[in-house]
Amino acid sequence: MTEDDEFDSANPDEAFVRFEDIEGRLVCAFAPVEFRKQKGTNGPYEAAFADLLILDGEPHALFDPVPPGVNGAIGVVQQMMFTTDRIIRMLKRVEGTGRPLLGRPETRPSKFRTKAFGLSAPTAADRELARGPVAQYRKVRADQEDPFS
C-alpha cells in the first residue's frame, strides 16, 4: 500500500495483542461480549470477543489509545479474542448484567502440559484503582456509539 492509496488493507502478518501482552495487568472486559463458534484444525471451538480497558502496567504499542475523558487507564484492546473455557465461562456469567468483568489475566500449569489461561479475582486495591477509569469509560461508551470515532 502506498501513502496516496485511498484504501487500507489487512495485513495477515500484522501483530496483534496476545494473552501474554495483558498477563498480570489489571483489565476490565466490557459487554457486549460476542460469543461465536470458530473453525479450527481439530474441529470447531467457542470463542468470546470483548473490549478490554487496560488499567495498569506499561503502555504497549499494540494497545489502542484511551478515549478522551478517561483518565488513569493505560490503553484499550478492542475485540480481544478469548478461546479458553475458563475465561469464556466468566464472560458468560456477566453477560447481560451490565457489569464489566475485572481481573488479572494469568496462566497456570495444566494437566495437559500446556498453560491454562484464566483471570484472577481482583483485590480491594484493584477495585479501587479501577473504579474511576471504569466509570469514565462506561460513560464514554454510553454517550457515543463508537468511543474511538
Image (tube, helix red, strand yellow):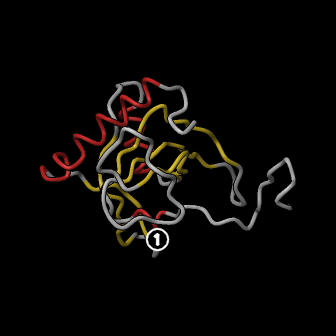
- Given residues 18 and 15, the one toward you in this image is 15
Please state, as top left, top right, bottom left or bottom right, where the N terminus lies in the image. bottom right
Q: Residues within 10 Å of mark 1 (few under 14, many from 20)?
A: few
Q: Secondary structure at mark 1?
A: loop
Left/right of residue 82 with respect to residue 120 in the rendered view: right
* Residue at the image point whose x is 53% and y is 53% from the top: 83
Left/right of residue 122 with respect to residue 36 in the rendered view: left
Left/right of residue 94 with respect to residue 18 in the rendered view: left
Q: Position of residue 82 (x, y in %)?
A: 51, 52
Left/right of residue 9 with respect to residue 135 in the rendered view: right
Query: Tag count in the figure?
Result: 1
Q: In the picture, residue 143 is in which quadrant?
A: top left
Q: Amino acid at mark 1?
A: Phe
* Residue at the image point whose x is 36% and y is 28% from the top: 139
* Extreme-left residue of the structure: 124
* Extreme-front residue of the structure: 4
* Residue at the image point whose x is 29% and y is 34% from the top: 135
The image shows residue 98, relative to residue 82, as above or below, that is: above
The image shows residue 133, relative to residue 56, as above or below, that is: above
Q: In the picture, residue 146 is in which quadrant?
A: top right
Q: Position of residue 62 (x, y in %)?
A: 54, 62
The image shows residue 100, relative to residue 56, as above or below, that is: above
The image shows residue 27, relative to residue 101, as above or below, that is: below
Residue beneath label 1, please? 112
* Residue at the image point whose x is 45% and y is 42% from the top: 67
Please state, as top left, top right, bottom left or bottom right, where the C terminus lies in the image. top right
Q: Position of residue 30 (x, y in %)?
A: 41, 37
